[in-house]
Image: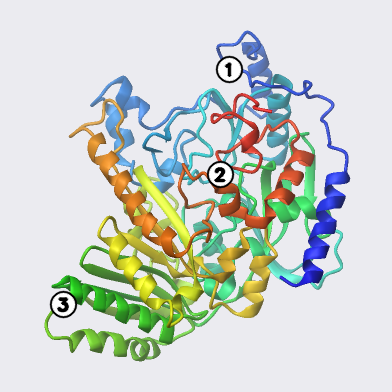
Amino acid sequence: MIRRELLKQSAGLLSLLALPIARSPAASPAAVRRIRPSDAAWPSSEQWEQLKRAVGGNLLRPKTIWSACAEASGSPQCLSALQYAHNPFYLGDNPGGTEVSGWLNAWSAAASAYAIAAHSTADVVEAVNFARRHNLRLVVKGGGHSYLGGSNARDSLLIWTRAMNRIELHDAFRPEGCSAQPTPAVSLGAGCMWIDAYTAVTTKAGRYVQGGGCTSVGVAGLLQGGGFGSFSKRYGLAAASLLQAEIVTADGIVRIVNACKDPELYWALKGGGGGTFGVVTRLWVRTYELPDRFGYVGAKIKAATPEAYRRLVGWFVDHYVSALFNEHWGEALNLYKDEIEISMVCEGFSTEEVQRLWAPFFDRVRASTGDLTFTKAPYVATAPARDWWDVTHNPAMIKDDRPGGNVAHAFWRGDQDQVSMFIHGYESQWLPASLLDPSQRRRLIDALVAASQFMIVRLHFNKGLAGAPAQVNAEARRTATNPKLADAFCLMIVATGGKPPFPGLPGPKADLAEAKRNASNVSRAAAEFKKIAAGAGSYVSETDFFRSDWREAFWGPHYPRLKAIKNRYDPEGYFFVHHGVGSEDWSADGFERRT
């Protein structure tokens, strides 16, 4: 970063630190412990009834989908819940549901004491004010995809924004109070999922919005986490497209924030982490011209010997550098012990152009001496970009098949395994583009081969912005995310999980001994990359629950500025998530203040 930018940021931080900390007049002085249902100060039944009336009757007593089986294994209620346990839309439509069911030695599915199914910003204000008056633990949920369990807290009050799903397209949007040139945009309620956004913007209107790859992810959570999608190398971070947001802060005030109004809070929402600075209720996001075609390339190749496997990995890395390290390509390479799986997407190419790009690599494999075999033949296809998220045109998607389900709701077949998974271990790390240099490439290949002997290694090329257009890269650096993502060619992920270890579930019990072995192997695989890219940082939404350097990994030099913003807008710490900004001030469960 140039010196002028450093001075500008330092000046902004100093001025922010000099501001008086806002205190809510209704808050109790410096509460050190949140109230639980077992405490005498827990709200009375009449007070809960008053809240219920204030939010139009939308006060719920949520349960996890697993509770029916714990209460009566094999009951109709249990079997009904399990029927759709691998449907992410079913989980998201349940106030006690989460995309994954928990994490070994970290967290397990647990429903909040109460939930407000917010239908309006006014409902959110009522919820925030009630929690502040009674000193309650608050959690916020839109899509419920937090791997780290951000919306999962027993004895809490949940603000559930699922019903706030209005979408509006704008041909020329200008943020309030700004004189910027109007731009095409879409406004999205906090309960929208990305499939809702893609259906409205792409399938129906023929434009593009940068969102998440997983269609059932909530728009608000993804944007606040920075947010990557399949085509981020071309369109950048989802957070960089955020033009404006409506947010209810801990004082119960509704704020419209953008580059001209509350610019520091606006900046914090662009990658500072969800559920941390308030409850986002609406977002305005830039839209883009849609390319003619999106495409997919898939194949699986097995090596007969360790030497052949290392040669294969080296060939792929060489091919990536020469043909794919640019704005057009995203998604993944999966590395197994003796096999690689290609599952990549592209934008802006015809099928013939994609075939020509990949021919040198596939021909090289075919011409090998017999120690390399295609276990899944190469598959190359492109299609009109407008049809990409349309389940009636895309066979790679699974539709929501529940009676009365939204006909436009569908998710990728490749995401099926994670739904309701109980995580055994999960680590991620950005890999800097310097590892692709000829002088460093051998170290990268050695690490890939060594790590894949312990656990499947996944390289997500769209989740690192090296190779993106200069403007895309620059815009990412202006968000609150760790700027090291702009120097990375991919995000490396090693992760695994299995059946939830909950009582009453039919079939064989979850093997916790195996889960512990898996967690150990995830750590051993990740260690190979820490040797070659120490301090490279990690993505806040896909990362290790137990990471000790989380402040540096997620936000790098931006953390002091984010903490100052947190102190200003939420001085009493009502918004807590595990390893979120300011969480170091509280106990691991968010109930007791440490400082």
Q: What residue sits right under mark 3 in the picture? A: 373
Q: CA gap, disc 1 to disc 2?
A: 23 Å
As rendered, which of 232 and 455 lies closer to the eye? 455
| Tally of numbered discs | 3
- Under circle 2, the secondary element is loop
Q: Nearer the viewer, mark 1 or mark 2?
A: 1
Q: Are marks 1 and 2 in contact (CB under 8 Å)?
A: no
- Looking at the image, tell me whether mark 2 or mark 3 is earlier in sequence order: 2
| Amino acid identity at mark 1 | Arg
Q: CA gap, disc 3 to disc 1?
A: 59 Å
Q: What residue sits right under mark 2 in the picture? A: 142
For the rendered model, the colour scheme is rainbow
Could you tell me residue 94's position as x and y percent? Answer: 46, 37
Identify the mark at residue 36; answer none if there is no mark. Answer: 1
- Looking at the image, tell me whether mark 1 or mark 2 is earlier in sequence order: 1
| Amino acid identity at mark 3 | Thr
Could you tell me residue 95's position as x and y percent? Answer: 49, 34
Residue 209 visible in the current orientation: no
Compared to residue 440, the image places residue 509 above or below, namely above
Could you tell me residue 460's position as x and y percent? Answer: 43, 66
Q: Is residue 98 left or right of residue 53?
A: left
Could you tell me residue 474's position as x and y percent? Answer: 67, 72
Quadrant of the snapshot with the C terminus: top right
